[in-house]
Amino acid sequence: MDNELGKILIIDDDEDVLIAAKLLLKKHAKEVIIEKNPKKIPFLMNNGTYDVILLDMNFSKDITSGKEGYYWLEQILDADPSAVVVLITAFGDVEMAVKALKEGATDFVLKPWQNEKLIATLSTAVKLKRSYAEVDKLKSAKKQLEDEISKPFKDIIGDSPSMKNVFSIIDKVAGTDANVLILGENGTGKELVARALHQRSLRKDNVFVGVDMGAITETLFESELFGHKKGAFTDAKEDRVGRFEVANGGSLFLDEIGNLSLPLQSKLLTAIQRREVTKIGSNKSMPIDIRLICATNMPLYEMVHENTFRQDLLYRINTVEVHLPPLRERQDDIILLTEHFVKVYCDKYRKDRKKVASSTMKKLQKYSWPGNIRELQHAIERAIIMGEGNTLMPDDFFFLVQKQDSVNDAAENFNLDEVEKNVILKAVNKHSGNISKAAKELGLTRASLYRRLEKHGL
């Protein structure tokens, strides 16, 4: 089959051997590169990738020992641990062959070679190279799938009109490859919607890869998303497969995309537009086939107006938008969610199934839930662990009692943490969960308010 050998690099100080090999192999390879000087190996390895490397064991300085061949084999494998190297020599020394194989060579051929045997050897080596790449990708995908399987609460729960509208959008969009932007406050279930889109898509049998963009530092952004080659920077001790590559053929979920700086937004936009990525330390781009799903709790349209979010990136990621309502606007769903979490945590902590008192449920429905579903989930988990009876009462949810008895009397409470928590609750409730407005009234930045919400478990 034409081009079955891919890209071949041949290194030999005998020019006749190089020409003969190139004439033979160019009919079977996509590209054949020949090099007489082994000192150019580091340059060749840094500026290209090869399906197989044919390396002479003995150069002019050292005719028979093979020491030069071992040295350059080590240099090649140090630059690319997955490189497939076939060694060639005019001397059929068995010990030399065994040592070369132990040190990382894939195979060993004698010159003068038999043409058919050389082609067969290289064909096998190329298949091995491709299997190495596939194994690396499968390992990364397997780990990702195992992480996904272990995640709880995969299903979205809700029967309110606003959630029915969300389900309708998911059904319409899931079967397409349209880019989707999910908007909603923290804790509203944006990741669950992203998973639902994937599970209902034509890519459902491939991997779903989630990335928390807010947790990636500026320096690790390209390495995390695009991958890197060994030695590309100080801590790059081995090749890394980027999230784009792992997600190839599946869905890539970029959460908290509003947290990216403008320079990182530019790099992301380039990858999305070109549908290809380049690993750090490599000059070779890799085509990427992904379904892109993004999410944020930040006001992207306001950020575009303020020049803190690129308008062209927003257009790229929001072919379709899904707006997730906050829990305070889904009071009927609070009953369904409460019953679901009670069952989950009673099973998890091996407790008899607890009931929820009607007075408790009414207070749960009236509470504003600034932390949305995530706050409800944590509150029920705590109540299941700490509650002593078979029925969950309002007292099992400390914040319900606090809201009734303490918030209005905050001035009488001199515990600074409690005062801060109460003031934050009042500001968030006053602005119906709008973090930007609450932060402005409190004289804080959005980031500072989020840290305090996290600190107080809100």
Image (cartoon, rainbow, N blue to C red):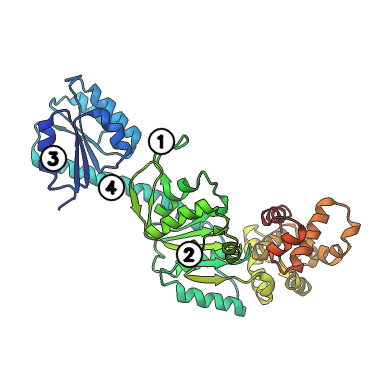
Q: How far apart are marks 2 and 1 (CA)?
A: 33 Å
- Residue type at mark 4: give it: Arg
Q: Which of these two is toward me, 288 or 302?
A: 302
Residue indicated by mark 3: 22
Quarter holding the C terminus? bottom right
Number of the label disc, if any, that sits on residue 130: 4
Query: Relative to residue 93, is residue 6 depicted above or below?
Result: below
Q: What is the x, y in percent for residue 211?
A: 51, 55
Identify the mark at residue 345; answer none if there is no mark: none
Distance, label 2 to label 3, CA atoms, is 47 Å
- Please tell me which of labels 2 and 1 falls first in the chain: 1
Residue 45 appears left or right of 168: left
Identify the secondary structure beneath mark 4: helix
Q: Separation of disc 2 and disc 4 at Cα? A: 33 Å
Label 1 to label 4, Cα distance in Å?
A: 22 Å
Is there any visible trace of residue 31 in the rendered image?
A: yes
Q: What residue type is labelled 1?
A: Gly
In terms of image quadrants, where is residue 343?
bottom right
Rendering coords of residue 176 (x, y %): 41, 71
Q: Mark 2 points at which residue?
A: 317
N-terminal of the two: label 2 or label 4?
Answer: 4
